[in-house]
Amino acid sequence: MGKNPTDRGKNGSKESVLVEGDGGPLGMVLAAANGNDHLLLRETIEAIVIERPEPTAEAPQHLCLDADYDNPKGREAAAAGQYTPHIVPVRKEKRSKARTPGHKPRRWVVERTLAWLCKCRAILVRYDKKAANFLGLLQLACALCWYRRLHRLGRCDSKQGP
């Protein structure tokens, strides 16, 4: 009969992405698909490619995370990165009480960014054997995402010189 068709024993990959409030990718880490997300949080925060403004008491920086990060290690990584964590509780009975009326969940912003990145055919299905090559394609797709966004806003002018 053979192996289960959904578990072929093949290696997979997981992309951990940190995005800003409007969905622009700021940092990305590539790891094995069988690992937990909360173990990648510290690396993902360290992978930010731009200079972060220093968080202050008047202007704290928030980090919205899903239920996989609701553990001491996830909270510790957010605190080490000087973020104020907003983590969805694991238990369903706490979820309905945790969200205040009128506030929408923010996790969809990350999901939307991952969908934008998957529009690049080289990323949709991983054909690269080397992780460094695939990470390079992901980073190129992130740069393309930012270029398209800035071009739409009119901040990218091809007539300007260097």
Image (cartoon, rainbow, N blue to C red):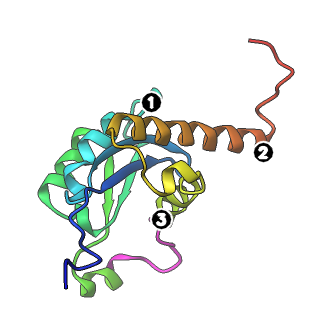
Quarter occupied by the C terminus: top right
Q: Is residue 100 above or below residue 41?
A: below
Question: Helix, strand, or loop for circle 3?
Answer: loop
Tag of residue 49: 1
Task: Examine the structure image and report whether residue 103 is included in the region drawn in magenta.
Answer: yes
Give the residue at x 25% y 88%.
93
**Place of residue 42 in the rendered image (x, y in percent of width and height, measured from the top left):** 24, 42
* Number of other residues with Cα within 10 Å of mark 2, as a class: few under 14, some 14 to 19, many 20 or more: few
Q: Can residue 107 be seen in this snapshot?
A: yes
Question: Helix, strand, or loop for circle 2?
Answer: helix
The three-letter amino acid code for the residue at tag 3 is: Arg
Q: CA distance from mark 1 to mark 3?
A: 22 Å
The three-letter amino acid code for the residue at tag 2 is: Arg
> Seen in the image, is 154 located left or right of residue 142?
right
Residue on which the image places disc 2 = 152
Tell me the magenta residue range.
98-107
Q: Main secondary structure of the magenta part?
A: loop
The three-letter amino acid code for the residue at tag 1 is: Val
Pick whichever, 13 or 53, lies toward us.
Answer: 13
Please report whichever mark, 1 or 3, sits nearer to the chain's N-terminal start: 1
